[in-house]
Amino acid sequence: MARVKDSQIYQLRIDIASIRPPLWRRIAVRGNTTLNRLHEIIQVLFDWSGYHLHEFEVGAVEFTDDPESQREFGMRSEKRVSLDDLSLAAGMAFTYLYDFGDGWYHRIKVEKVLPPDSTGVYPVCLTGKRAGPLEDCGGPWGHAEIVKLLKQVAEGQIKMPAWDEGPPDEEDEEVDYEIRERLEWVGADYDPEAFDLEAINAALKRFQR
């Protein structure tokens, strides 16, 4: 059996589909990484919680960690398949879908297949753009709506409600309750343009070897 550090290295670019401007991450992982572990890594990359169903599709083959989907739809277990098992080459791409309701489709492109690196520590995030979308925000459409509202806040067109502001006067016709509720849910701390490489790699340490 090959040692862990004898595995070749895959450089992957992961883009969330249907988001403009592009929201993506570039990572390097060892070839012995299973699809189930790649799922866990992607969750860290986009600051998600992993409590929704997901699947990978490589070629015409679907993989999941959900036993019911494996039984009913003939999908393969992602826990038993590594990147090396998929015979991936530079230029190839496959998909990852997270949360069937919100429909977060990811395109995962193999940018490079590199020789084994016995001294490196993987997985590692190399670069990326923008903060991961908020979980349960309504998919790409909901994310786009949040970005638009936050831009309007930044430009002074609408106001971000303060946490201690209390409910608005029901007779105030200028209050858009739907927008106010949306902004309260988003919170003042979310910046869709933020990308913290150091924080992501700190969170990835639990997978590194």
Image (cartoon, grey):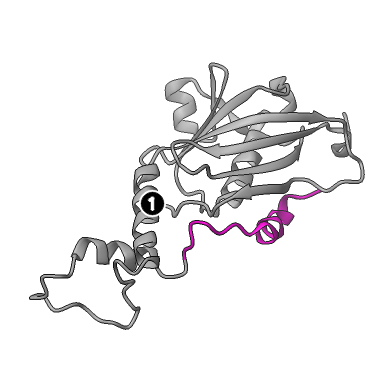
Type of the residue with mark 1: Asp
Q: From which residue to which does the magenta span run?
A: 190-209
In the displayed structure, 122 sits above or below 107; it is: below
Which residue extends farthest left?
171
- In reply to whether residue 193 is colored magenta, the answer given is yes
Residue 82 appears in view: no
In the rendered image, residue 70, in percent from the top left (x then y), is placed at: 49, 26
Count residues near mark 1 (Cα–Cα under 10 Å), then give few for <14, some for 14-19, many for 20+. few
Tell me the residue at 91%/41% (across/down).
118
Tell me the residue at 69%/53% (across/down).
204
Tell me the residue at 71%/30% (across/down).
111
Q: Nearer the viewer, residue 70 or 31?
A: 31
In the rendered image, residue 165, in percent from the top left (x then y), is placed at: 28, 82
In the displayed structure, 59 sits above or below 19; it is: above
Left-right relation of 153 to 16: left
Please name the residue that numbered disc 1 is placed on: 136
Q: Quadrant of residue 195?
A: bottom right
In the rendered image, residue 191, in percent from the top left (x then y), is placed at: 49, 62
Q: Quadrant of the N terminus?
A: top right
Left-right relation of 72 to 62: left
In the displayed structure, 81 sits above or below 37; it is: above
Provide the secondary structure element on which disc 1 rests.
loop
How many marks are shown on the rendered structure?
1
- In reply to whether residue 154 is colored magenta, the answer given is no
Residue 191 appears in view: yes
